[in-house]
Amino acid sequence: MPQHKSAEKRVRQTARRRAHNRYYKVMMRNALKSVKAATSKETLVEEVRKATKILDRLATKGLIHKNFAAHRKSQMARMVAAMDAK
């Protein structure tokens, strides 16, 4: 238990930030799952566009590493290219 006022405030802030960060990370995971679940080329391209936007935003805010975002975007681009080949 916190013993000082500043420690109590820190506990409140940490809980609020953790909830905020978890919300965005769950949103990111759901976007990546919807990309993998896409069946047609049109839906795949649209889902990739949405997921790319989310990944870029989270990397800018520092919630995920920029290389993680770059890796996922590269994977999605390969999925679109593979869909073109079919």
Image (cartoon, grey):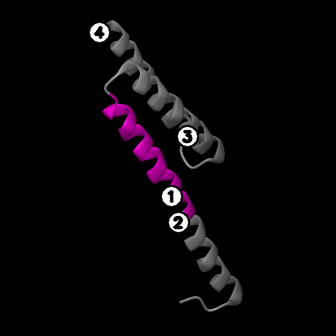
- The residue at the point 44 percent across, 41 percent down is 31
Residue type (three-letter) at the residue carrying disc 1: Tyr
> Is 69 rendered above or below residue 84?
below
Q: Which mark is residue 54?
A: 3
Q: Are marks 2 and 1 in contact (CB under 8 Å)?
A: yes
Please rate how many residues cluster around mark 2, counting C-alpha atoms within 10 Å: few if below 14, some from 14 to 19, many from 20: few
Residue 73 visible in this rendered orientation of the protein: no
What percent of the width, then of the height, locates residue 85? 33, 7
Tell me how far mark 4 sits from mark 3, CA to CA. 27 Å
Range shown magenta? 20-38
Q: Secondary structure at mark 3?
A: helix
- The residue at the point 70 percent across, 83 percent down is 6
Name the residue that disc number 2 marks: 19
- N-terminal of the pair, mark 4 or mark 3, is 3
Name the residue that disc number 1 marks: 23
Residue type (three-letter) at the residue carrying disc 3: Ile
Tell me how far mark 3 sits from mark 1, CA to CA. 12 Å
Tell me how far mark 3 sits from mark 2, CA to CA. 17 Å
Name the residue that disc number 4 marks: 86
> Is 43 rendered above or below residue 3?
above
Q: Secondary structure at mark 1?
A: helix
Residue type (three-letter) at the residue carrying disc 2: Ala
**Quarter assignment of residue 16:** bottom right
Of labels 4 and 3, the one closer to you: 4
Q: Are marks 3 and 1 in contact (CB under 8 Å)?
A: no
Tell me how far mark 4 sits from mark 2, CA to CA. 41 Å
